[in-house]
Image (cartoon, helix red, strand yellow):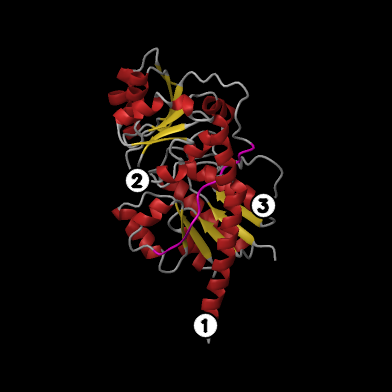
Amino acid sequence: MTLRILINSTPWHEVAPRTYGGIESFCANLAKGLDALGAEVGIVSPGNLNIDGDHNIIHFQSLRQSANQNYSQPEPLIARHNAFIDALRSTKWDCVSDHTLIGSQMASLTSTPAVLTAHRIMDEQYRALYGAISRHTPIVAISNRQAELAVDVNITTVIHHGIDTDVYRPTSHPSDDYLVFLGSMTQFKGAHIAIEASRQSGYPLIIAAKCQEQGELNYFEEFISPKLGNDVTWIGEVGGTDKINLLANASGLIFPVRWEESFGLVIIEALSCGTPVIAFNRGAVPEIITNERTGYVTQDLKSMVKAIEHIDQISRSTCRKEALERFDYRAMASSYLATFTKSIARYHSTNMLQNL
């Protein structure tokens, strides 16, 4: 039986985004993977649908243009809710794949089963929200560490992210003469630590990071701008082939995360390009990086600098091999399809019992 899956993405960024947008990139890979497996796929998102390759994905556009950084504005939220309701009413969907905090409740209004993917940090606030939702909706965690921190949340299963490893490919002759930091301009992502680590190890550093919100701008002005120089360059946000080339040519990706990162999509993007990763031991990092094989899991700045000095001992082909084996979007989509199938059966079985 062909399943009809409706993916409810965020209200702000296109799927897939041209630059920053981890959840939206995930949704693009999930949609492409489910489509390849024969599912009928719909997706609710703003702007254009930027999913490469041949596919039959139905797009329910919430806004004509991506809202990007307007996170505090109500218009993108209202537009997404309206588009989602229209999508629910347009077709009898077998399951909603929700990547927000409200999609599962809205799906219940049309008696449509839903599965929620938990993308957020499992702090006190989100544990309470996910815990309440998990009483009636299956929840997928994106790492074992996130599931471990999800106290009082009923986690159905853990599925790691996957990317298109045919797109994120190594280059045949990498320049291999700089380190790179990709992410957003926040203290939690640790760009200022990346600067210290690269300088102490003697490597030039290229910073490619989102810097749009006021908090990001303040952090940049106080901690990053004064430290820029010939050996530390900030190039703003990058995407597409620019991002791939930046990763593929780097000696290593620096990931000095300072909070319980639930996954870390850029890590597997780097590995798929054959680029080792040096990261702090926080969140899902030790699940993704095989220490001393695809990079180094470090405890502090001192050990990070020491690891960088040994970065040439990591095989780029091994990084690529692990990405192919563990983090390809097709395997991820297959795991999600199995979860959707089980959740649909459980939903209808429960309803039958309640109607007896």
Q: Distance between the residues labelled 3 and 1?
A: 32 Å
Q: Nearer the viewer, mark 1 or mark 2?
A: 2
Q: Mark 2 points at which residue?
A: 260
Q: What element carries label 2?
A: loop
- The tag on residue 353 is 1
Q: Earlier in the sequence, mark 3 or mark 2?
A: 3
The x, y position of residue 217, in whole percent, is 34, 29
At x 30% / y 29%, what residue is drawn? 301
Q: What element carries label 1?
A: helix
Direction bottom: furthest residue: 356
In what quadrant of the picture does the N terminus appear? Answer: bottom right
Report if residue 163 lies within the magenta region: yes
Q: Mark 3 points at which residue?
A: 35
**How many numbered marks are there?**
3
The x, y position of residue 194, in whole percent, is 36, 27
Q: How far apart are marks 3 and 2 (CA)?
A: 32 Å
In depth, the one of 82 and 126 nearer the eye is: 126
The x, y position of residue 152, in whole percent, is 33, 63
Q: Which of marks 1 and 2 is nearer the N terminus?
A: 2
Name which quarter of the figure residue 310 lies in: top left
* Other residues around mark 3 within 10 Å, as few (<14) / some (14–19) / many (≥20): many
Span colored in magenta: 154-166
At x 58% / y 44%, what residue is drawn? 325
